[in-house]
Image (cartoon, rainbow, N blue to C red):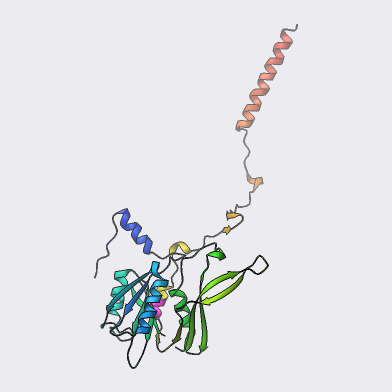
């Protein structure tokens, strides 16, 4: 058995916490790889994808002849590169006579292949893959002026999706809401789904686990206006069974004041003026 190493320093613990599951995940990094042979069209697509995800992408230009994503044992190199570059999204391009301009999209969990799809009859699977590949950081507030790029995906047939990358232009409309126009700037692609692989059930169950701190706390609600509010349950007080005592600070003070007033009144009677 492989021994489990426990972090000893605070620095190593903080690094492990960065990779731990979160309620709101960070932006995922994309790994872009080339196969043994690629066409000019495919090279252009891979380059455009890298520029679109430049801040969250790693691109290797060296040809990789040992990567065969859908074959048994062929994903070992993909998992190695995923671990090396710390990327959970995969884009692999290859070109052959049987499968020209072949683009493989994939996701990993714990740096193991989670699922793969070739540009299936399962368009829902393709939708999840595209959303995960082009999803950015989660933000609470968004200024419309800061939105300048839009991806438009249209299902043309049960196996074909047209993806278009557009620039957003805001035009005056005479109202407080501007009129929006889309200008195609590329890359634009016809994605024909040829092959896909769904995740294994045990791996999917492990990946879908919610982090420990995501459990809902009882009797605590969080509201934007009121903030965090808690509800406390107090048992019914049985006043009839409560024992009353005279040993109370408030009663002691009253008795002292009454005694002083009584002594003062006696002095006044003894020494009348």
- For the residue pair 113 and 244, the one nearer the viewer reads as 113
Question: Residue 57 appears in which quarter of the rendering?
Answer: bottom left
Where residue 187 sits: x, y (%)? 44, 79
> How many numbered discs, if any?
0
x 32%, y 90%: residue:
96
User: Does 45 sit left or right of 263 as displayed?
Assistant: left
- Residue most extreme to the bottom: 98
Residue range corresponding to the magenta coloring: 200-204
Q: Is residue 203 magenta?
A: yes
261 in magenta: no
Quadrant in the picture for the N terminus: bottom left
**Residue 151's spot in the image, x, y percent?**
50, 76
Vertical position of residue 30 compared to residue 267: above or below: below
Residue 159 location, x and y as percent?
47, 89
Q: What secondary structure characterizes most of the magenta part?
A: helix
Instruction: Please name the residue shown 28% across and 74% down the image.
Output: 80
Q: Is residue 57 above or below residue 259?
A: below
Picture quadrant where residue 242 is located:
top right
Would residue 31 be seen by someone viewing this image from the given angle? Answer: yes
- In this orientation, which residue lies closer to the viewer: 128 or 91? 91
């Amino acid at each position: 058995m492989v021994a489990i190493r426990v972090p000893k320093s605070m620095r190593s613990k903080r690094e492990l916490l960065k990779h731990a599951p979160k309620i709101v995940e960070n932006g995922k990094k994309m790994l872009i790889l080339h196969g043994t042979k690629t066409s000019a069209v495919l090279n252009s697509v891979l380059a455009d994808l890298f520029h679109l995800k430049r801040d969250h992408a790693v691109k290797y230009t060296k040809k990789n002849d040992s990567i065969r994503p859908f074959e048994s044992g062929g994903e070992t190199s993909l998992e190695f590169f995923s671990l090396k570059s710390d990327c959970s999204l995969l884009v692999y391009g290859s070109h052959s006579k049987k499968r020209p301009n072949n683009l493989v999209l994939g996701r990993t969990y714990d740096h193991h292949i989670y699922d793969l799809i070739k540009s299936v009859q399962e368009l829902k699977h393709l939708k999840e893959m595209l959303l995960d590949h082009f999803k950015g950081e989660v933000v609470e507030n968004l200024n419309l002026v800061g939105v300048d790029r839009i991806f438009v995906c249209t299902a043309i047939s049960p196996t074909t999706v047209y993806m278009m990358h557009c620039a957003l232009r805001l035009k005056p409309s005479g109202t407080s809401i501007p009129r929006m126009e889309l200008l195609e700037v590329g890359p634009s692609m016809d994605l024909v789904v040829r092959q896909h692989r769904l995740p294994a059930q045990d791996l999917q169950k492990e990946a879908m686990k919610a982090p420990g701190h995501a459990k809902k706390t009882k009797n605590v609600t969080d509201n934007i206006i009121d903030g965090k509010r808690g509800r406390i349950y107090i048992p019914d007080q049985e006043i009839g069974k409560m024992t009353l005592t005279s040993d109370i600070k408030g009663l002691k003070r009253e008795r002292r004041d009454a005694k002083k007033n009584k002594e003062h009144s006696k002095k006044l009677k003894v020494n009348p003026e």
